[in-house]
Structures are given as structure tokens and as C-alpha cells.
Amino acid sequence: MVRADGSPHVAPIWIELDGDEVVFMTSASTVKGRAILRDPRVSLCWDDERPPFSFVTVTGMATTSVDSADLLYWGTRIGGRYMGAERAEEFGRRNAVPPEMVVRVKPSRIVTKMNVAD
């Protein structure tokens, strides 16, 4: 993602997988949300900080949804993954309101590297 001035923007996200798509949520009013709405090209990176270290990067195109049922479903599912089942509904309801949006990334390129330090 890039900012309106063209400089890079990086932000941590909570994700879930839906088939071969990466799904996350963000507010349409954040730097991240505005960048995706302006230009749907995104790059994502996950790393395993435990030796011998590994990472995966995903580059793709994002689509967005503000459908209330979609927001509640994904907010609950993602909230449950990171906060536990007992708080999933709380996070789902909190995040199922405007200006939140569901972002789906369809990967066009995936790069992985395992055992970087070996």
C-alpha cells in the first residue's frame, strides 16, 4: 500500500483465510483503508521470528465490502481467532459498523522462505 504522496505504508493486521484469499478488516477512514480504496494493489508479509526463521509474502489485488452481514461474520471470525472464542462476538459486533470494511486479497504472487538462518 502507498500513501497519497506515494510513500509506502505498512501496518499490522489480523487476518483469516477464506480458501485462497486473505481476509482482514480496516476502517475506510484510516491511512490503510484510504490507500486500498485508492489503489487496490497490496503486499502482505508474515514472519516467524523463531530461529531458524521463515517468512511468506503475498502480493495481490484487494476488494472491499461494507455489507453489514459480511462485516459481522468476518469481524466475529477474525476476533475469535485473535481474542478467543469467548470474545469473538464482542469483537464482531464492535467491528460490524461503518466505516469498517472487509478487505479480501486475491494473491497473484506468493514468496516463501523457510529456515533463513540455516
Image (cartoon, rainbow, N blue to C red):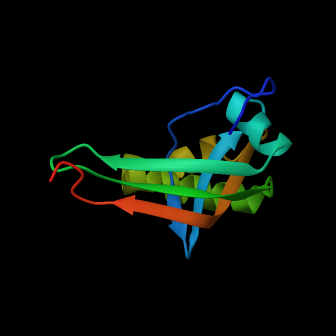
The answer to which quarter of the image holds residue 73 is: bottom right
Q: Is residue 1 left or right of residue 45?
A: right
* Coordinates of residue 96 in the picture (x, y in percent): 69, 48
Q: Is residue 86 left or right of residue 40?
A: left
Q: Is residue 107 above or below residue 64?
A: below
Q: Please name the residue shown 55% across and 33% down the image.
A: 11
Q: Is residue 80 left or right of residue 99?
A: left
Task: Give the residue furthest to the front.
Answer: 118
Out of 10 and 90, give the one closest to the viewer: 10
- Numbered disc total: 0
Out of 98 and 63, give the one closest to the viewer: 63
* Coordinates of residue 113 in the picture (x, y in percent): 33, 59
Quadrant into which the C terminus falls: bottom left
Task: Give the residue furthest to the bottom.
Answer: 19
* Coordinates of residue 24 in the picture (x, y in percent): 59, 52
* Coordinates of residue 39 in the picture (x, y in percent): 81, 45
Out of 34 and 28, give the one closest to the viewer: 34
Q: Please name the residue shown 68% across and 39% down the image.
A: 1
Q: Please name the residue shown 79% across and 35% down the image.
A: 34
Q: Is residue 80 left or right of residue 19?
A: left
Q: Residue 28, can we see it?
A: no
Q: Please name the residue shown 15% across and 47% down the image.
A: 51
The answer to which quarter of the image holds residue 6 is: top right
Q: Residue 52, can we see it?
A: yes
Out of 80 and 111, give the one closest to the viewer: 111
Task: Give the residue furthest to the right.
Answer: 38
